[in-house]
Amino acid sequence: MTGAVDGNSDRLYPPTVALAQDAAVAEGVHPAKHVCCVFSSDAQLTALSAEFLRLGLAAGNRLLYVADRPDEGALLADLADLGDVGGLAERGALLVQPVRDAYTKNEVVDPAAQVEAYRRLTEAAVADGFTGLCVAADATALVTGRNARRAFMAYELAVDQFMATAPMQAMCAYDVRVLKRAVLDLVCVHRHQRVPAGVRPGFTMWPGHDGVGVSGEVDVSNAERFRDALDAAVDALSTTAASEMRRRLRIDAADLAFIDAEGTSALVAFSEQAAPDGRIEVADPPRSLRAIVETLGWRERLAFVHREATA
Amino acid sequence: MTLEVGIRRDPHTHGYRHDAFFYSGMDEFIRGTAQFLRDGLAERAAMLVVVSAEKIERLKAELGDGAESITFRDMSEVGKNPARIIPVWQAWVQEQMSAGRPLRGIGEPATPDRRFDELMECARHESFLNIAFEGSEPFWLLCPYDMATLERNVVDEARRTHPSWIADGEGRASDDYVPVDTVAPFSPPLPPLLGSVESVQFIDDEMRLVRELTSKAAQTAGFSRDKEWDLVLAVNELATNSIRHGGGVGTLRVAVEGDRVVCEVSDQGHIRDPLIGRVPPDAAGSSGRGLWIANQLCDLVQLHSTPSGTTVRLTMRA
């Protein structure tokens, strides 16, 4: 990546929620519902996790820490910064789990089953008197293969949709030393990102109540990832959405600054797979998308609308 | 006047016929083209006329009721970029084919208001027409050239790009006709890029640099926001071609001349298909998509390609 890629990012990317200690923590609401962190040292992972979980603790959440460690002792040791982790664990305020136990035993995660597992954990936390569930998870070990990553992108979108209305918050941490460039596949499906300068997926995708939203820029550098993310969105939609959502599928493109012809053809493929009539609405598209659809005659597939007019 | 004299090929049995029509001044233009259209009416031909708005008005007045069954389109809208004209003819021929009527067309791309580089592309367009409609339905295309106002070399070029021509009511096969070099259709070099040139080399994750440089030039030249983004998109798509088909690396050079921006993308690719960017790309494949988009969005697209590399030059005016 070049330095210039970050030059304009304020305009192109939605603001990342600061995880500062002084951020408002009230009513069980965590300042960042679902944030992606990219780390490059074990110390960085434990510091980020402790920071995130501390906010959950202050909000009265039950905490869950998941990482690639051999046993519970090692996991608790990671969180020494939180204070009396033994005491927290004893009274059920802190759960820890090696990553291999927390997620699927299979190579590839099942998005629906995984969201269901978190639903039960969240309900249990509330039943036990907590305001909700706060998760810090390093899932790097589960996403080293491309297919596994694809499935995990779908899961990330599905769980984001779940968290939008449930008292659950999560920090998803990924090790850039292991994943290298592929870490961008996971970063791009998180609206809130805490990533080193230069780690930019170019676009960000998030689930909406009737489709997905996209911000940033899609071009030859990330068109393949964009296609993967849309495929993941198809899976996530089938996981979370009743048929009602599928009646009118919508792409919120108000914060999409640029998309090229490859990205647009991925949107057309998405409309074929995901929309019952092969046609999707695109709200507030950038000029480039309009021009591509005009010149390539794809008007039948993508219908442009104003977000305000039809919301 | 009859236009059949001296023409050895019969369009009804030989399909496509492509004549230059050399005239001097508006009166001779009207006389010749009106006769051509009246002959077409007599044989119940489907007819499309693509000339200037002024000439359309004059022809409609001349033909009266006869003009009603003829389709007229303004060349300045259809063919500002001459590379957009062949798709218009092809779509029209496609549309008319099933009716089984003979087809007649008049297209006048080369007019004295055009800049030199545009006239060069008009000649290339005329030449590529011979490939686009080779072996097609009975289709007689007449291309008027005004000898009173056009430079001599433009008229000479028309003799090379048309298999036959008509002048003073007489038609003949052109001795100067040069068929398209289908092995190296884009071998002639481009004239040098003028003005102060900024450039950037790019690889796949530097498209933003490509867009930023283009965008800056468009703003310097006073483009509207929409035009700026159209040019940015066209350049982006050509740069994408460099990544996908041109060796994975390319160079963008940008020059601003007043209210005009010229952007040039060079890479190691080699283009041999003369009709690339002039036939609509199919939905599945990406072949020719970048050049098609550039042709649709830009005022002029020039192409130079040899086995050692390709340069595509885009021109757009505020």
Image (tube, rainbow, N blue to C red):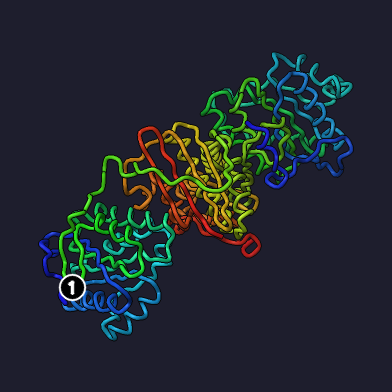
**Residue type at tag 1:** Gly
B82 to A8, vertically: above or below = below
Residue A298, percent from left and from top: 44, 55
For image coordinates 27% across by 61% down, the residue present is B94
Residue A274 visible within the image: no
B179 to B159, vertically: above or below = above
Determine crowd level at label 1: few under 14, some 14-19, many 20+ residues with C-alpha closer than 10 A: some
- Check disc 1 and report its element: helix, strand or loop: loop
Residue A47, percent from left and from top: 80, 24
A264 to B41, vertically: above or below = above
Q: Nearer the viewer, residue A145 or A65?
A: A145
Give the total of numbered labels: 1
Residue A161, percent from left and from top: 65, 44
A58 to B85, vertically: above or below = above
Residue A127, percent from left and from top: 78, 37
Taking the image as shown, residue A84 lies to the left or right of residue B133, namely: right
Q: Nearer the viewer, residue B81 or B293?
A: B81
For image coordinates 73% across by 19% down, the residue present is A41
Residue A184 position by quadrant: top right
Say which quadrant the N terminus of chain A sits in: top right
Say which quadrant the C terminus of chain A sits in: bottom right
Chain hosting mark 1: B
Residue A182 position by quadrant: top right
Taking the image as shown, residue B261 lies to the left or right of residue B4, namely: right
Taking the image as shown, residue A97 lies to the left or right of residue B36, namely: right
Residue A265 visible within the image: yes
Q: Nearer the viewer, residue A237 or B288?
A: B288
For image coordinates 67% across by 46% down, the residue present is A12
Residue wearing tag 1: B169
